[in-house]
Image (tube, grey):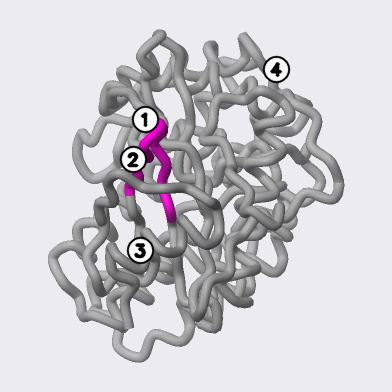
Amino acid sequence: MMLDIDDAGRLLIDQYGLAPRLVRARTPPEAEVQVFRIETRQDRQWLLRVRRADRRLPAWLGGGHSLDWFGRQAAVLRWCGRHDFPAPALRRTLEKQAVARWERWAGLLVSFLPGGSLAAGTEGLPHLGRLLGSLHALESPDGLPGSWWYPLDAAAERARALLDDIEEVPDEWLALQADCLQALAAWPRLQDLPLCTLHGDCYPGNALVLPEGGLALIDWEYAGRGPAVLDLGTLLEDCYRDSGSIPMPDQGALRAALAAYQETRRLMPGEAGALGAAIRFGVAYRTAVRFTFAEESGWSEAVLRGLRREQVRMAAAAGIGTLVQALVHD
């Protein structure tokens, strides 16, 4: 069952008191999470995300139901708003609820941020690094929900179970599977590192260049508390040159992105030395998710492209981590 455009309009009126002038679907009807772009008669723009309220979340999102997941996102976005961090603003329902409940659906309404794409590749990383450092420098309350990576022991166990449960892994991916299991087992290496609010998927595709020239982060589905070094690892994991069997760190890109990050937050003791482990942990977690997609829909070309990217990132992690340590101690 899908929520159509007319239903989305009724949800907006009933739950938010908004009279939509235009409702556009941004996802296909069969999508697990449906997204609608809304334009109101007051010329405001919003994004509505909806999911069946009674449907359980996949294991890699920590289980629970849609209300739990949207509630975690809402808590993080409220926190961003209190700290004036550039992110979509949450809109509460008429009953002052963060998450809408309408018939069989749960939903989250956030402001639509206009803007352009950040430069792809490593060119935009310094700008994103500066913004990510400012996010990590903000005080994160103990009560903020955990990101999809936290608590670390639970996240590692979820990913390990996903990797172990795949019945038929093609031979070419067995080595990556083994590397991922080893990377997940090293989670205690990250356990005592400083915690902050993580975005959870910090790469240029989730950054917007705003019309006034600033930068904002969007798509906070995986956000919450966790070790800062995991977010930083995602930022830096593509700072390599694929020059053969062993990808080599791109020293120029890495130096620029790391320097920009440290303009707004200095690395704490132990973080530079753990960066290689953090990159491997993030790669292992995403690889477990990609293996799950392969089991559900087959080893499609899209799945294989994603696995190839993770394979190269896993191979590059050690070199990136070593270079970060050298740069921090220069």
Residue 58: percent from left, percent from top: 49, 76
Question: In the rendered structure, does residue 38 fall within the stretch colored magenta?
Answer: yes
Residue 203 location, quadrant? top left
Secondary structure under the numbered disc 3 in the rendered image: strand
Considering the whole magenta stretch, tell me its main secondary structure: strand
Question: What segment is highlighted magenta in the picture?
Answer: 37-48
Q: Are marks 1 and 2 in contact (CB under 8 Å)?
A: yes
Q: Residues within 10 Å of mark 3 (few under 14, many from 20)?
A: many
Residue at image location 44% in from the left, 57% down from the top: 49
Cα distance between the residues tagged 2 and 3: 17 Å
Mark 4, residue position: 266
Q: Are marks 4 and 1 in contact (CB under 8 Å)?
A: no
Q: Which of the numbered marks, if any, corresponds to residue 43?
A: 1
Which amino acid does the dot numbered 2 rest on?
Glu
Q: Residues within 10 Å of mark 4 (few under 14, many from 20)?
A: some
Secondary structure under the numbered disc 4 in the rendered image: loop
Mark 3, residue position: 34
